[in-house]
Image: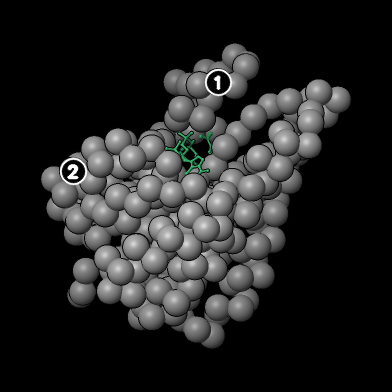
Amino acid sequence: MSQLKVMVTGASRGIGRAIALRFAREGAQVVIAARTASALDELAKEIDAAGGDGVPCQMNVADLGNVEAGLYRALEATDGVLDVLVNNAGVFAIKPIEEMRAGDFTRIIDVNLNGPFFCTLEAISGLLASERGHVFNISSVAGKQGFEGSTAYCASKYGLRGFGDALRLELADKGVRVTTVYPKATDTSIFDDVPGDWDRSTMDKPEDIAEIVWQTYNAPAGADVDDVDV
Ligand SMILES: NC(=O)c1ccc[n+]([C@@H]2O[C@H](COP(=O)([O-])OP(=O)(O)OC[C@H]3O[C@@H](n4cnc5c(N)ncnc54)[C@H](OP(=O)(O)O)[C@@H]3O)[C@@H](O)[C@H]2O)c1
């Protein structure tokens, strides 16, 4: 089998980092995207050491110009082919509605919903060039259920669910599968600045989500997995 070409957004830490390392163990070329260049450079070395080929790609998924430039560089590195796009970059915040300003809402929508759209748009030629293309959208349990103080986050994750469901129909005859993943609380830095009593010891681990993504990609042809409730 030829070397897998994978791109993971939000790869500098947490779930994205774990997914990038999981595909590295399969010998994949992994384009790792996020804003923090130093973390991407470190991860690229770890990917190389794990048997893959790490390609750092600094970009802000909320900025279309940035994504256009990032995907141009990514597809140059992968010879125009992308087998897997993981739309994982995301931000989380809790704020009651009466304290929210417009910017609190749009910041979350920009990253969590516009980001996956921009990345998919710019990656589509690479996905269509793959013999087995697959888009993973990392939504959340908050993409199926409301939570207090989470109007923006829930709107973004419900939106991502709709985006994935429609995209799946559009790409079904073109050999590109689309899976939406709905993790529940997972022990990552996403909780670092969020007020609340989070018991991280009972949370899932990023590696659990990474294993699920890999197993879903590796499922036999015809065994399409549309949604994964973790
Ligand atoms: N942890 C959970 O409990 C949980 C549960 C359900 C769903 N999720 C979802 O899983 C995904 C990953 O979350 P996580 O827990 O791993 O979070 P995390 O540890 O905070 O990591 C978030 C990642 O996204 C990147 N990122 C944030 N804003 C970005 C932007 N504008 N452009 C590019 N990259 C950006 C960050 O890198 P830089 O800061 O370097 O850009 C980082 O690599 C998110 O979509 C989140 O909503 C998480």
Lower position in the chain sequence, tag 1 or tag 2:
2
Residue at the farthest bottom position: 173
Say which residue appears at 23% left-offset and 52% top-offset.
Answer: 54
Front position in the image: 66 or 115? 66
Image x and y of residue 69, in percent:
43, 60
Image x and y of residue 48, in percent:
16, 49
CA gap, disc 1 and disc 2: 28 Å
Secondary structure beneath dot 2 equals helix
Image x and y of residue 24, in percent:
24, 53
Front position in the image: 189 or 79? 79
Say whether residue 121 is left or right of residue 145.
Answer: left
Say which residue appears at 54% left-offset and 85% top-offset.
Answer: 173
Q: Which kind of residue does numbered mark 1 sit on?
A: Asp
Q: Which kind of residue does numbered mark 2 sit on?
A: Lys
Q: Which mark is residue 45?
A: 2
The image's colouring method is: one colour
> Which residue is under mark 1?
193
Mark 1 close to ligand 1, CB under 8 Å: no
Say which residue appears at 21% left-offset and 74% top-offset.
Answer: 2
- Quadrant of the image containing the N terminus: bottom left
Say whether residue 87 is left or right of residue 169.
Answer: left
Say which residue appears at 65% left-offset and 66% top-offset.
Answer: 165
Say whether residue 46 is left or right of residue 88.
Answer: left
Image x and y of residue 5, in percent:
30, 66
Vertical relation: 80 (above or below) 13: below
Front position in the image: 44 or 219? 44
